[in-house]
Image (tube, grey):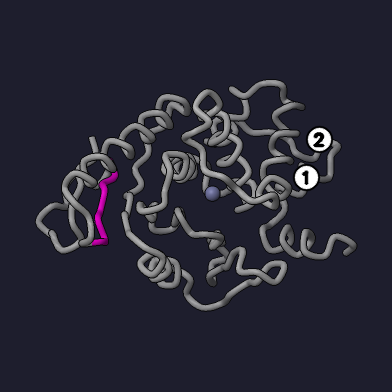
Amino acid sequence: MIDYVHKDDTSNVSNLAEGKIVFLTDDITLDEIQKLTALVLTAKKMVEEYFGVKTTFDILICKGRWEMEVQVMSRREGRNTVINGNRRSSTNLRGEYYDLSGSVGITDYRLEEIIIRYDIAKFGHYLHEMIHAVILKDYPQQLREGLAWYFTLKLTENRRYLRQSYPAWVERLYISPVRKLAQILGDDDFLRDFATGRASLEEESIDDEEIQDMFLPAELFYSKKQNPRN
Ligand SMILES: [Zn+2]
């Protein structure tokens, strides 16, 4: 059960272990709160049933580009990495990357929080970030991203209208190598257990550069993708 609280309501700090919904915005009606809570619970249930893992991350709800940017910036702590000239992602001093493209949803692994811009989020966005929350956080950022996308698409296979659209570079950089890995493994159950850390695989034994790149440290991965000839 998720309970929802407003950021000013410090009396409600229960069920922390279960994850809660926190509304950072005041500009939301009770009706919207109810709809959104149902959406979050549906996504949470889908992920927990599929992966067999409980999600405990808090979900922070904000509205509008500005509220989202404040959240992203407050988590950045300094250094920026510009990739391919557009602000595709940035990294803080701990080397964690945040996807800034559109910034509809981000997952903060360190604070164990999911931040969603609810005014433009589709169900797929909630699902995607919820999947992030169950993926082993020790994996390099690009591998987490690839796995999160792969399973977002898989879980919405029969309900494509729930999906968010995504740019071609997401397909190229993240989805395509994981799809290739899934084909080699021939078993999504194994890939699912690998995502949550219940199964491991010897990536060195997979003779495919694109797949092996997914296991590189994130800094190396992005510099390689930025300068393919290096
Ligand atoms: Zn993601």
Under tag 1, what secondary structure? helix
Q: Is residue 5 above or below residue 192?
A: below
Quadrant for the C terminus in the image:
bottom right
User: Which stretch did the figure color magenta?
Assistant: 18-25
Task: Name the one closer to the observer, 64 or 133.
Answer: 64
| 23 sits left or right of 201 in the view | left
Which residue bears the numbered disc 2?
206
- Quarter of the image for residue 204 reads top right
Quadrant for the N terminus in the image:
top left
* C-alpha span from label 2 to label 1: 7 Å
| 21 sits left or right of 43 in the view | left
Which residue bears the numbered disc 1?
212
| 211 sits left or right of 28 in the view | right
Give the residue drawn at x 39%, y 52%: 114
- Quarter of the image for residue 45 reads top left
Under tag 2, what secondary structure? loop
* x and y percentages locating residue 43 in the rendered image: 38, 35
Q: Amino acid at mark 2?
A: Ile
Give the residue drawn at x 59%, y 22%: 189
